[in-house]
Amino acid sequence: MLFKPEQRFISERCTGCGICSEVCPEDAVKTTDSGHVVSFASICIGCAHCGCYCPSNCFDLPKEQDDKFSQEDQIQSLFEYRRSIRKFSDKLVDEAVVNSLLEPVGFAPTGQNAQGISVDVILGRERIHRLILNPLVKLTRFLDCFRLLSFVAGPARGIVRKIREGEDIITWKAPCVLLFRAPMMNVTGKTDAVIAATMVSIKAEAMGLGSFWNGVVQMVSPILRVKKCHAVLCVGYPSLKKYQHVPAREWTRRDIG
């Protein structure tokens, strides 16, 4: 639900600190010279910054519990420990776990505080086979009926053969597939969906789950029954234990200006 400050504002609590006006990215909070709120402009995007940073809780939001937050080193360890998982145990992912896993979507940042991120959940191997694997196997067999696809694939012809024979090297027997998408008219939709999926993948790690980004399903989604999406995560319980951290990937920082 979009945050609407004019509906939540409790004027009696306002002390005139002016912080709400300072943090508003759209300059939508109108205050007097003394800092007291007098109105909210229609350009408000509902980001809730005014309510989040109000020391008097004039917008009647649930208070933060500082003891809930992980320390910096714990967060960094979580980032370092996360790896893409493609070997899943037979343990099923139930509805309660999926609901908890997807909670970060409601708090993921979006361009212009855009609403409407949706996540399609395919839960269970039978559904995954019916909606994703079986159509891809049929398509591969059709395109490779005279081994033309295998010829074009070159060194990757072994992958084509495995898919043609029905081996699951697409979702790797994950028990749950999550498809993230944003509304078509959202100019930052792809980025918004990827950010939401990223937050979910990090929570999966914290919950003892494993996941991997499925670029294949994301690319071919327009021709599948699942329809076009912007990001795909395959999720399940890992069958193997990780013992060491891998080195960080190479990246570059540039100071400009």
Image (cartoon, rainbow, N blue to C red):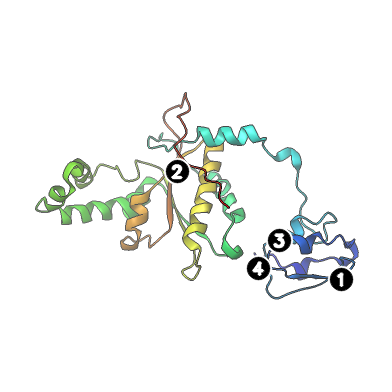
* Marks 1 & 2, CB-CB < 8 Å contact: no
Local secondary structure at mark 2 = strand
Q: Nearer the viewer, residue 245 or 225?
A: 245
Closer mark to the observer between disc 4 and disc 1: 1
Assess disc 3: are there few (<14), some (14-19) or many (≥20) residues with their C-alpha within 10 Å of its C-alpha: some
Estimate the x, y position of residue 240 in percent, counting from the top left.
Answer: 42, 28
Q: Residue furthest toward the left?
A: 146
Local secondary structure at mark 1 = loop
Left/right placement of residue 3 relative to residue 214 reads right
Estimate the x, y position of residue 104 in percent, counting from the top left.
Answer: 59, 50
Q: Which residue is mark 3?
A: 48
Above or below: residue 241 compared with residue 140: above
Question: Looking at the rendered structure, which numbered label has been put on residue 32?
Answer: 1
Q: Which residue is mark 4?
A: 45
* Marks 4 & 1, CB-CB < 8 Å contact: no
Q: Which residue is mark 2?
A: 235
Residue drawn where x is 20% and y is 53% of the image: 140
What is the distance, in whole Å, between disc 4 and disc 3 at their CAs?
A: 8 Å
